[in-house]
Image (tube, rainbow, N blue to C red):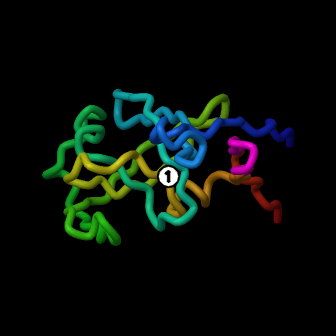
Amino acid sequence: MTTLPAERFGYVEADPSFGSASALPYATITLQYGDREITVSGLVDSGATLNVLPYDLGLQLGAAWERHTVPVRLAGNMADSEARAIVVMGRIGRFAPVRLAFAWTRSNRVPVILGQTNFFMEFDIRFCRSQLFFEIKPREKLEG
């Protein structure tokens, strides 16, 4: 089994007036739901428990809020936002698409967040913050 090399991404400055002190790890990811797909920038957040999808992006993917009935509880500054479970396909770079479960929130005041469940379960990520890059590759499947 041949393993593809990791995809490398640069940190993105959130506020140019603070320069690299405001840099955050954003990765380009293509999300697909049904016959629609969109390419977005997602915050790769090892401190986030869940993947989070803003409301408008779910609509752009063709999802209907009323058809998604499994509630998801968000925490932190999103605790007051209603969220529901949605599963989409996600593709990073040249890697094969994977199923990603998102908390689709009724809010648009949050970026796409790629968190522990289940982005970090599907990919291995290596952060090199001092060098302003990070790398992503598919998790290696254990044989046996």
Return the residue nearer the eye: 30 or 140. 30
Q: Left or right: 39 with respect to 124?
A: left
Residue positioned 17% across, 49% down in the render: 65
Return the residue nearer the eye: 88 or 8. 8
Residue positioned 69% across, 52% down in the render: 125
**Magenta stretch: includes residue 78:** no
Q: Position of residue 82 (x, y in %)?
A: 20, 63
Q: Quadrant of the C terminus?
A: bottom right
Q: Quadrant of residue 132?
A: top right
Task: Using a 10 Å C-alpha cutoff, classify the residue at mark 1 as few (fewer than 14 neighbours), some (14 to 19) or many (20 or more).
Answer: many
The single residue placed furthest to the front in the displayed view is: 17
Return the residue nearer the eye: 24 or 1. 24
Q: Quadrant of residue 91?
A: top right
* Highlighted range, magenta: 128-136
Q: Left or right: 48 with respect to 140?
A: left
Give the labeled residue for mark 1: 114
Return the residue nearer the eye: 13 or 26. 13
Residue positioned 71% across, 36% down in the render: 8
